[in-house]
Amino acid sequence: MTVEISVVVPVHDEAPNLASLDAELREALAAMGREAEILYVDDGSRDTSLAVLRDLLAQGAPDSLRVRVIKLRRNFGQTAAIAAGFDRASGEIVVPLDADLQNDPRDIPRLLAKLEEGYDVVSGWRRRRRDRAFSRILPSRVASWLAGRLTGVRLHDLGCTLKAYRRSLLREIRLYGDMHRFIPLYLARIGARVTELEVAHRPRTAGESKYGAQRIFRVLADLVLILFMSKYYSRPMHFFGQAASFFGVLMGLVGFLMVAFKYGWLRLIGIDYQASFIQTPLPALGGTFLIGAISSIFFGILAEILIRIYHESQELRPYSVDEVFESSGEPLCAD
């Protein structure tokens, strides 16, 4: 069956939401009158999500819709689950969607209409987001703003899973870590035309959020990598050369100010500058921590490059599929 639209839904412990989500998806896709498929990716759920999905498969589907369930061997994370769905999607347009019912499937036709205006990527913008302000909304907005400043791709809401992509472009990238939210930035780097569209966002009514405060630090680390990948991936020596020059100048300036403070200002105000400097080692400690932070960033980027070389040279995936189910709920294949 050849399809035009593939909807990819990563699922992790979302059993209470799946029946309603499936009904809404089927209704939205049927109203479009186009050949479509839904790919549910069970990312190692510990509840009854897989059983619910198999029950939904057993209900059958109209001729214009194909429904599949991809069961991963364990919990690999949202990015890996989305990658598993992308790899098995057959539609010319691929739309990822959260399974928690906060994204509205009725926005899918609007995303596709925007895509047909000549764009390659349409990113959802949850302008009226129904989440906790401090732990969810604020970090997301800061990350999106920083990413826009660093890469030049100005999107209000990179964290929104609901997006529409042309599948021909998704073949050009590999997803690792927690990088699914930055796919539009990767695609823009290779020339994709990217825009955004305001979409609905609904409060969570069942299940629990899988994100906590630790997500803030992961997003900040990903932003550093995005800066490197978007500007210096094909010429890493430029990055390290410029960074070394910048931090060399910065450390020289800090050193000069420290010496001036020790031998100038303290003497001017009549303080025993030798004793004061010995008793106040904060400048030296600060410099040490700064050098350590810089080194950690450099090593982190190098490690990311090595991981990508390792996976891509051996054609490894960041996930492992256990079984794939379709139609009647019977297994199709295993990885």
Image (cartoon, rainbow, N blue to C red):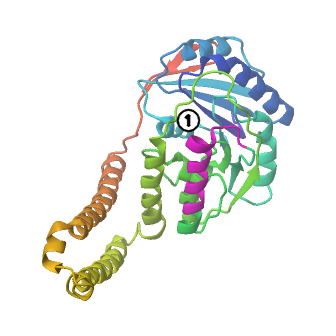
From the viewer's side, name the closer residue of 285 and 199. Answer: 285
x and y percentages locating residue 82 in the rendered image: 54, 38
> In the rendered image, which quarter is residue 144 located in?
bottom right
As drawn, is 14 to the left or to the right of 199? Answer: left
Q: Which amino acid, by three-letter code, is at mark 1?
A: Gly
As drawn, is 309 to the left or to the right of 150? Answer: left
> In the rendered image, which quarter is residue 97 located in?
top right
> In the rendered image, which quarter is residue 146 located in?
bottom right
x and y percentages locating residue 268 in the rendered image: 26, 88
Magenta residues, start to end: 129-146
Q: Residue at x 18, y 73 (%)?
A: 276
Query: Which SS class for mark 1?
Result: helix
- Residue 273 in view: yes
Residue, disc 1: 85
Does 16 appear above or below 140? above
Q: Is residue 144 magenta?
A: yes
From the viewer's side, name the closer residue of 120 and 145. Answer: 145
- Residue 92 in view: no
From the viewer's side, name the closer residue of 74 and 331. Answer: 74
